[in-house]
Image (tube, coloured by chain):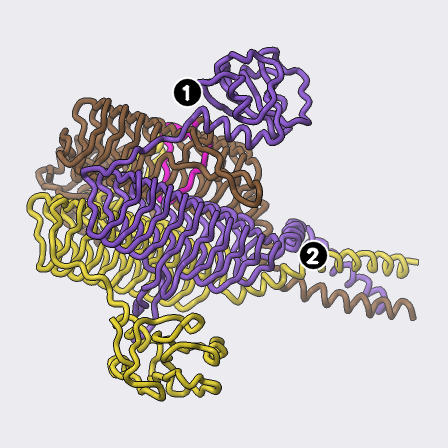
Chain colours: A yellow, B brown, C purple
Amino acid sequence: MPITLKELAERCNARLEGGDTTALIHSAADITAAQTGQVTQLTNNRYARYIKNSSASACFVAESTSLEDKPEALALLVCADPEMSFIKAVELLHPDRVYSARIAPQAVIETDVALGNAVYIGPYAVIGDQTIIGDHSQILAGVYVGRNVKIGKHCRIHPYAVIYDDTVIGDHVIIHSGAIIGADGFGYKFRNNRHVKVPQVGNVIIEDHVEVGANTCVDRGALGSTLIGAGSKIDNLVQIGHNNKVGKNVIMCGLTGVSGSCTIGDYVILAGSSGVADHVNIGQGAVVMARSGVAGDIEAGTQVFGSPAKEKRVAYKEHVAISKLPELLKTVKLLEEKIQQLEQKTQS
Amino acid sequence: MPITLKELAERCNARLEGGDTTALIHSAADITAAQTGQVTQLTNNRYARYIKNSSASACFVAESTSLEDKPEALALLVCADPEMSFIKAVELLHPDRVYSARIAPQAVIETDVALGNAVYIGPYAVIGDQTIIGDHSQILAGVYVGRNVKIGKHCRIHPYAVIYDDTVIGDHVIIHSGAIIGADGFGYKFRNNRHVKVPQVGNVIIEDHVEVGANTCVDRGALGSTLIGAGSKIDNLVQIGHNNKVGKNVIMCGLTGVSGSCTIGDYVILAGSSGVADHVNIGQGAVVMARSGVAGDIEAGTQVFGSPAKEKRVAYKEHVAISKLPELLKTVKLLEEKIQQLEQKTQS
Amino acid sequence: MPITLKELAERCNARLEGGDTTALIHSAADITAAQTGQVTQLTNNRYARYIKNSSASACFVAESTSLEDKPEALALLVCADPEMSFIKAVELLHPDRVYSARIAPQAVIETDVALGNAVYIGPYAVIGDQTIIGDHSQILAGVYVGRNVKIGKHCRIHPYAVIYDDTVIGDHVIIHSGAIIGADGFGYKFRNNRHVKVPQVGNVIIEDHVEVGANTCVDRGALGSTLIGAGSKIDNLVQIGHNNKVGKNVIMCGLTGVSGSCTIGDYVILAGSSGVADHVNIGQGAVVMARSGVAGDIEAGTQVFGSPAKEKRVAYKEHVAISKLPELLKTVKLLEEKIQQLEQKTQS
């Protein structure tokens, strides 16, 4: 749905400099690709060189930005926070798909289900007994929701996500396809040469504004709950084991694993393919860098790297040292010879 | 379903010490969280400090445990194996969900399907031609079972697990949601600058008492079978490639990958995010520690760590040495200078 | 469907040496397992020792192969390329399952859907508005295809794969169960102490002859497309983030992750559990070895190992050096003592 440059500027809190205020903008694009009729953003000086030859009709920039070589046809949308204004523009130009209130005839709604207002339930979805789904929530095709589940308002659960029994989900939660919430935790006791399953009778609690990526797994507690704090964002293919307490506004990138019974502080970042052993506490705001493995507690605000993970500065110093190690071996060999010669000299 | 303390003790092979034998216990909880009406366990001395202020009504303890500061109201359930007795209590107090024998009208059952007694088939499940499902097995909503599959007795397959054609599954097997059993192995031959697919015409065999985690993948054999031995337990998001022979009572933790054509001995443990290259043999009882990558055969009983994985003792010694490396570089630098001085002295 | 040895030889471009031309071959097997009535291949000398006692009826071998101790009953199928001839034999003896043209009555086909000739749509599949599916493509049970999706000819999408809105898929593409194509990329801006979602309004383009493994995720672009080039083969449980440009004939093994906005050149190999940070360029034909983490650009043709990944030769030299490090520490300790002694001597 195209809108004029003038309206775009107004709705995105930007001041228009140059360009034709009546020009229609139909979509948003990256600065490397934007064409006539498209709006883009410049928020990183690395990309300033693309401006000169850009065919874009408009570009969000910060107040402080000075652009030489700006094409005549490119309007500047000057604003306090170009990234946020651009997000606003993308939302206007590429509106989110609407799922109007409707219960698909092919959905199975079991007994004692409480559906809020304006709920969408897609075809082949299954909603278990005693489950509650809040207003404006969208349960897309084929989603399985177990028994005694609570889903808040304004949630979107994508096709074939699975929500096991007893899960509690807050408001404005997004769960992507293939995510499995509440499967059994991985717990066994070894007796008589076999692994005896420990019953996993807890649940999962996901607070407001959480996003869970595709094919990510969050296991139910053995007893008690596995908790994902409000505002936390979890990427695809992440494994969160039983009884973890994940804080608020945590970031977990793809292919990361958190074993079990860990406490992950607010604002922690677990970068891609990282891992955390069980019963570990990670302090608020700590950063576990990509591919790192955390085996012990991490203090708040610390950045760690490696496997086993160490404080970043230490780990980097070791990595630099390792790169000098082959040379060091030769040096020491040489020193040995020299010392031998010195010993011979001084003995003689 | 609450039961009296007396009955709980009897059914869990415990001797009651103190407490009100007629008190009702309604659920189980961790020692850090248990309240009145709940039973807990103390199996690790680290947690003994929680006993003093616990509101729990009862606690399983070993015969040998001596507790000072036990609250008056806390009954002890003294037994030979508190962990096993507690598991029994959890099963009594939190009984597993029952799926009564029923074929949901929304299930698709293809031709020549043999269903045992008391089988449950959930809505939107699809059961392919010539497939056999044993007595008391539960195929939950939306499970896809291909053609010519055999599923034993007392299995539970959770929603949206996918069982490809020709898979053979034993008795008492649990497969969690999103697990994919029998997809094509990853095999190509490179010819004329492109990858030619090698047909994957084998199958997967899963023996009795195996548990397969959510979103885990077990690929079919290229020719012959990929095998998961009896009693093995596989966590979420594990990749098991074609033609692996996984032994009995093996443990594989989350995000682990086993390439292909490996032999994994009985009782092997692959800890979280570990990996095994193809055609590798791992001997009985070996332990691959978290995040380790195994590139060559591992002898029975060995513990290995790192990537490439080495015997634990060796890997640890190297890690300690690496932490001394930055200092070592300085030391050697100093020695070089001293030797130079010595050389000058002795030459003069 | 058994065929005679004579016909097998003809259809697989092989010359028959020995054996009964009228003998029936019913299946293919590995050289370690093949029995009477089965055909096998010998393409690796390591396995030549299995020939002597093999009960196989026939074996593909290269022109140059000379076999001593060949059993009388074993026919040789001599050919220019035994691997390719054997693939042909496997295809003949184990024909791929046929899904005849049919729209299952339990499928939901939304409005303005264009289905080609001879298309198969399985039960409980959902095909969204304005979607196009090409001739002979097979959309198996429970596949979810969103709105405005294009799927080419001769594709097979396995049960419960999910194709989000706007995805474009070429011809002869195979997508395995649980694969999620086009879920939102992982993008947020941090404002006022919370993570603000960046709308993900791009799409995924998958070119011809791509195979996508089970439970693999390919995220849609934030703006623009995430691209998987023709002929690329992606294993199970792989994470491909938004706006990556994956070249042609690329191989990505299980549990690998590519963050976002990377360029992966043609013929690149990402081995198992490897990872690539965002905005990285990997040159044509480069190989990232298993469990390696790439943080910076990689030149074409290079092999890299480790985390952070280094040129293989360098990484290996460092690994050898590390194994000598504990000994080196002792040596340097000894040298320090000797130098001290020398210093004392020369001072005196």
Secondary structure under tag 2 reads helix
The N terminus of chain A is located in which quarter? bottom left
Taking the spot 43% from the left edge, 48% from the top edge, the residue there is C208
Report whether A176 appears left or right of A287.
Answer: left
Q: Position of residue A28 (x, y in %)?
A: 34, 71
Q: Nearer the viewer's eye, disc 1 or disc 2?
A: 1
Residue nearer the viewer, A101 or B13: A101
Q: Dot 2, crowdedness within 10 Å: few (<14), some or many (≥20)?
A: some
Residue nearer the viewer, A93 or C21:
C21
Residue bearing the label numbered 1: C1
Query: For the point 6% across and 47% down, which residue is it?
Result: A112
Rendered position, B171 above or below C236? above
* Relative height, residue A35 to residue B66 (above, below): below
Identity, as a three-letter code, of the amino acid under mark 2: Pro
Q: Is residue B230 magenta?
A: yes
Along the viewing direction, whichever of B239 and B287 lies nearer the viewer: B239
Q: Secondary structure at mark 1?
A: loop
**Residue type (three-letter) at the residue carrying disc 1:** Met
Q: Which residues are magenta?
A: B225-244
Q: Are marks 1 and 2 on the same chain?
A: no
* Residue placed under numbered mark 2 in the picture: A326
